[in-house]
Amino acid sequence: MSGRVVFEHQASDKRNGRLVVQADIREMAAQLASRAAANTPRRTGRMASAWRTAPGYSDPGTTVVINTTPYARYVEYGTRRRPARAPMGRAVAAGSRS
């Protein structure tokens, strides 16, 4: 799994809390996955097409962005011989500026 970004937002309504903003959080995560796919280097396109969003593990107000290719971590963080390409990192950085 490549870089994992968790979006969280608390609403003022204590009863519904995170459920109120769940759709917005999913949309932000989908946009982040789309930006990460656009930033992913392409040879075959396999890694670029593997960006997905999934519901959080324990909290309904959490969505995770994942990449299921086995080599995604090496592209994101680099290796001793290859520099990091950081498609998720660049997507997060671009999102914080907009």
Image (cartoon, rainbow, N blue to C red):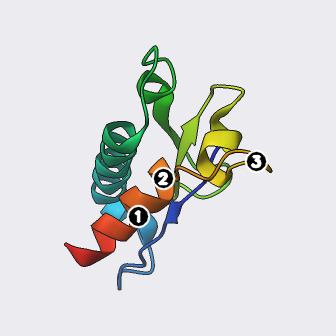
Q: Which residue is mark 1?
A: 92
Direction bottom: furthest residue? 12
**Pick the front one: 7 or 50:** 50
**Residue positioned 32% across, 75% down in the render:** 96
Expressed as whole percent of the image width and height from the top left, the position of residue 41 reads 43, 34
Alpha carbon distance from label 3 to label 1: 21 Å
**Disc 1: CA contacts within 10 A as few (<14), some (14-19) or many (>=20):** some
Determine the image quadrant of residue 19: bottom left
Indicate which disc, 3 or 1, sits on the residue closer to the N terminus: 3
Q: Is residue 92 above or below residue 98?
A: above
Q: Residues within 10 Å of mark 2 (few under 14, many from 20)?
A: many
Q: Amino acid at mark 2?
A: Met
Quadrant for the C terminus in the image: bottom left
Image quarter in which the N terminus is found: top right
| Element under disc 2 | helix
Asked whether the residues under the numbered discs 2 and 1 touch, taking CB atoms below 8 Å apart as contact, a structural biologist would say: yes
Q: Which image quarter: residue 39?
A: top left
Residue 1 showing in the rendered view: no
Helix or strand or loop: what does disc 3 sit on? loop
47 w.r.t. 40: above or below: above
Q: Which mark is residue 63?
A: none
Residue mark closest to the camera, 3 vs 2: 3
29 or 11, nearer to the observer = 29
Q: Are marks 3 and 2 in contact (CB under 8 Å)?
A: no
Q: Amino acid at mark 3?
A: Thr
Question: Which residue in the structure is indicated by mark 3?
Answer: 79
Which percent across, then down, holds residue 31?
A: 28, 49
Which of the labelled discs sits on residue 88, or is there none?
2
Residue that appears at 49% across and 17% down: 46
- Three-letter amino acid code at the position of disc 1: Val
Is residue 72 in view from this perspective? yes
